[in-house]
Amino acid sequence: MTPTRILPDLQFSVVCEDVRREVNGMFTIVGVLSVIPVPQLPVTVFKMFVVNRWTCGVGQFTETVRLVGPDGTNVLRKGDIRFSLKDAAHSSTNLTFLGQLQLPAPGIYHLEVLVDDVMKLRYPLPVLQVQPPPGAEAAPTPPEAPQPPPA
């Protein structure tokens, strides 16, 4: 008897700055993140992706990616993707785009990956406020325009 539905395994989950699709259909993952260092908070992260690959399943599924705040309950962003696997030898690589993401405070945020409301993975994504290295000053202030002599 051939199974009609098998919940898939999560082969990997990666947070990154960008993803490019090559001419041959392969993905190039750019800027893998294990921490988000920022010079000040709050901050807006303009572009971030979560890349998940599912395999060893059969059927149609809904992937849910959630970014949970440091308090452990506040869901800052949520994305759902429908996908299907024809047989256990196939895989599905799903991209969730998190654009214009507001991070209000430093702390340990968490990414949660679910399939059909079953939690498959939850991992930390620390947001740290860091000082720029010595010599890496902020953008210089432009010199003041010369003032005409008093009349």
Image (spheres, rainbow, N blue to C red):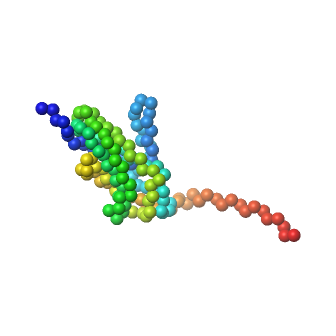
In the image, is residue 52 above or below residue 138? above
Q: Nearer the viewer, residue 55 or 127?
A: 55
Question: What percent of the width, then of the height, locates residue 58?
Answer: 22, 37
Residue in view at x 48 percent, y 63 percent? 41
As drawn, the residue found furthest toward the right would be 151
Q: Quadrant of residue 71?
A: bottom left
Question: What percent of the width, then of the height, locates residue 66?
Answer: 34, 53
Q: Nearer the viewer, residue 138 or 93?
A: 93
Q: Is residue 40 visible?
A: yes
Give the quarter of the figure containing the N terminus. top left
In the image, is residue 109 above or below residue 18? below
Residue in view at x 26 percent, y 39 percent? 60
In the image, is residue 55 above or below residue 40? above
Residue in view at x 35 percent, y 41 percent? 94
Residue in view at x 25 percent, y 50 percent? 117
Residue 6 vs residue 102: left or right?
A: left
Give the quarter of the figure containing the C terminus. bottom right
Residue 60 vs residue 105: left or right?
A: left
Q: Nearer the viewer, residue 137 or 117?
A: 117
Question: What percent of the width, then of the height, locates residue 65?
Answer: 34, 50
Q: Is residue 108 visible?
A: no
Q: Quadrant of residue 28?
A: top left
